[in-house]
Image: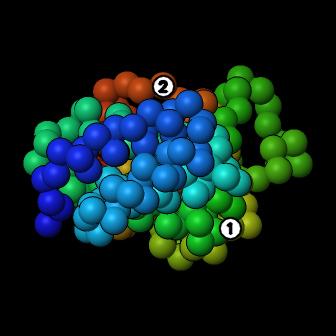
Amino acid sequence: MAINNPKKRILLRKGFTFFETRNYKDAMSYFTEALELDKEDLEARIGVLLTDLAADFPNEAHGFYELYQTMLSSNPRSLREKIQQNILDGIKSFDNGLEKLSAVFFDAQKDLKAEQIDGILYKDFKEMYECKGFKETFENLLFSTKIVFTNKEDFYEFLNTLLDYGYSEFCLQYIESMRSAIFYDAYLEQILRRLAEGV
């Protein structure tokens, strides 16, 4: 259990302030000091991992940070530790190669052809998994094929299906990778709540 230490809280606050302004050297210094005070502190570990990730993938690191803040602010405090663990798992998974995951939105009005989109349309992916099963289809396409969504409803359906099958890390990664194309709304809030609650 994390130690409630006022000095640690100040260090974390300063660390995230420096992280937000992209001063990663100072951010890392504060997070490391906070972690030395309490090696079990999940927030300090998140800070260290995010700052480390930001050296090579700044946009992705800040995406995880924004997602973390959104999940904290939209869920009860009792879920804080679960949210922190989810974010830690998501960052570690990204480091282990999940950055290869890709999805993209295209205008549904356009007549899309496979060679134009360089991927698989979600409706085709859905037909495949309805025949072969979601787990097998998803794992076969995971790192090799981009999933193309023509509307956000399909994307939300896909995220919920990932959660149904226990792929919470992938769900988190897809949300992070698509954050510039989707807006925070009631549906996304519901998905983030499911992620936080682990259901």
Q: What amino acid is found at the position of numbered circle 1 in the picture?
A: Phe
Tell me, for residue 20, which label it has, or none: none
What separation in Å lies between label 2 and label 1 (alpha carbons)? 25 Å
- Examine the rendering and report whether any part of residue 197 can be seen: no
* 44 w.r.t. 66: above or below: below
Q: Nearer the viewer, residue 98 or 152?
A: 98
Q: Image quadrant for the C terminus?
A: bottom left
> Secondary structure beneath disc 2?
loop
Label whose residue precedes the other's in the sequence (2 or 1): 1
Tell me, for residue 183, which label it has, or none: 2
Q: What amino acid is found at the position of numbered circle 2 in the picture?
A: Phe
Q: Quadrant of residue 84?
A: bottom left
Q: Image quadrant for the N terminus?
A: bottom left
Marks counted in the figure total 2
In the rendered image, which residue does mark 1 sit on?
143
> Secondary structure beneath disc 1?
loop
Horizontal side of residue 112 vs 101, given as left or right: right
Give the color scheme: rainbow, by chain, secondary structure or one colour: rainbow
* 100 w.r.t. 174: above or below: below
Q: Nearer the viewer, residue 110 or 50?
A: 50
Name which residue lies at 29% across and 69% down: 39
x, y percentage for residue 140?
A: 63, 74
Q: Nearer the viewer, residue 68 or 53?
A: 53
Name which residue lies at 15% across and 60% down: 3
Name which residue lies at 20% across and 38% down: 75
x, y percentage for residue 51?
A: 54, 51
x, y percentage for residue 149?
A: 62, 40
Q: Nearer the viewer, residue 112 or 68?
A: 68
Name which residue lies at 16% across and 51% down: 5
Q: Residues within 10 Å of mark 2 (few under 14, many from 20)?
A: few
